[in-house]
Image (tube, grey):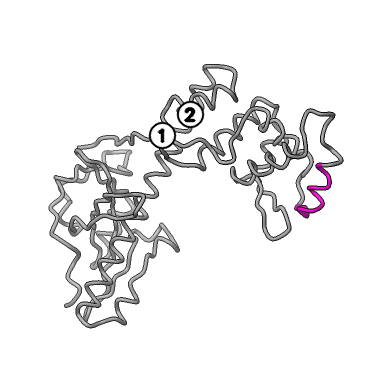
Amino acid sequence: MTSTCYFNISAMPPEPRLTRHIARAALHVAAILGREPSSIVVVRESYWRRATGGTFSVADLIAAEDVLVAAGFIRRAGDVLTLTPLLDTLIDADEDDAIEVLTVSLLGEQGPGAADRDEIEDTLEALVQDPARREALLLALGRRWDDRLRREIGAIGEEIVVAYAKEELAALGHADLARAVRRTSLVSDQLGYDVVAPRVGAPPRLLEVKATAATSAPLVFLSRGEADSGSRLNDWALVVCSVRDVLNRSGEVVGWCQRADIDDLLPEDVPGSRWQSVAIELEQLPLQPGLPRPSA
């Protein structure tokens, strides 16, 4: 069964707090910085020279600099402000567009949190005057937060599998093999598997990890490339984890299956079109408990 999974989440107000006044000050700081790295001392001195006729104080400009750092437009590295390509989007845009870009970037970086929708809407109302554009921004932020949460859940699932595999191997008296368990996804996401876990007396297990935090009808999303890797690699296995607590990065391994076990769950290609991804209900997967055996 193919479906779409949504997460119901919200976000905390940004720290430092973004107001329209500080957002406008951030555009002024972007113009001061230009496109070249700058010494923090020199930049701060320029704030004193270019505080604009009472519109922005030096404190405003420093707060605006903090906002640009938090949103990823500039980075502080030692005593130097290093600029990112994102800064060009502020320098070249008109004020309303630039404030919207800054808002989405900053709130999107904060990720899911405890504030409710009303608090987020109040923040946006102070920044963006057009109601239709505010609603569009809220939708854009929701997509960002959903994507961020899914990536975080996936990373936690891989950590859980790594810890499980290490504990298995250590319990067998193979601390050396336990130390060799690794997350290959940190190096490349194009391999078709996320974790390599050695076996005693056999080739290593190549584990494609899928993690879910859904409480009802959870779905496992499998790409064409991952499925093809499972067909090509003898020691490939699909492993499913349940993430119980995102904050504490905890959960459990639900089970595993081989590529051949899910052939009937994958869509068929049709003339002129090939499937690229599929969502499978967790309960449909023929999972065996734990991980594939750690020894031959």
Distance (Cα) linking label 2 and label 1: 8 Å
Query: Few, some or many C-alpha atoms within 10 Å of disc 2 (few <14, some 14-19, many ≥20)?
Result: some
Instruction: Point out which mark residue 120 bears.
Output: 2
User: In the rendered image of this protein, does residue 235 appear above or below residue 46?
Assistant: below
User: Front-most of 201 and 21?
Assistant: 21
Secondary structure mostly taken by the magenta-highlighted segment of the chain: helix
User: In the rendered image of this protein, does residue 206 appear above or below residue 239?
Assistant: below
Picture coordinates of residue 101, whole percent (x, y): 60, 33
Residue at left 73%, top 58%? 79
* Label 1 sits on residue: 10
Q: Amino acid at mark 2?
A: Ile
**Is 33 situated left or right of 146 in this image?**
right
Mark 1: secondary structure: strand
Tag 1 or tag 2, which sits nearer the N-term? 1
User: Is 46 contained in the magenta span?
Assistant: yes
Residue at left 67%, top 33%? 22
Picture coordinates of residue 73, whole percent (x, y): 64, 44
Quadrant showing the C terminus:
bottom left
Picture coordinates of residue 62, whole percent (x, y): 71, 42
Residue at left 60%, top 29%? 100
Instruction: Count the marks.
Output: 2
Q: Are marks 2 and 1 in contact (CB under 8 Å)?
A: yes
The single residue placed furthest to the right in the displayed view is 49
User: Front-most of 64 and 178?
Assistant: 64
Q: Which residues are magenta?
A: 37-47
**Is 62 situated left or right of 143 in this image?**
right
Quarter residue 104 falls in: top right
Quarter residue 77 falls in: bottom right
**Is 145 situated left or right of 55 in this image?**
left
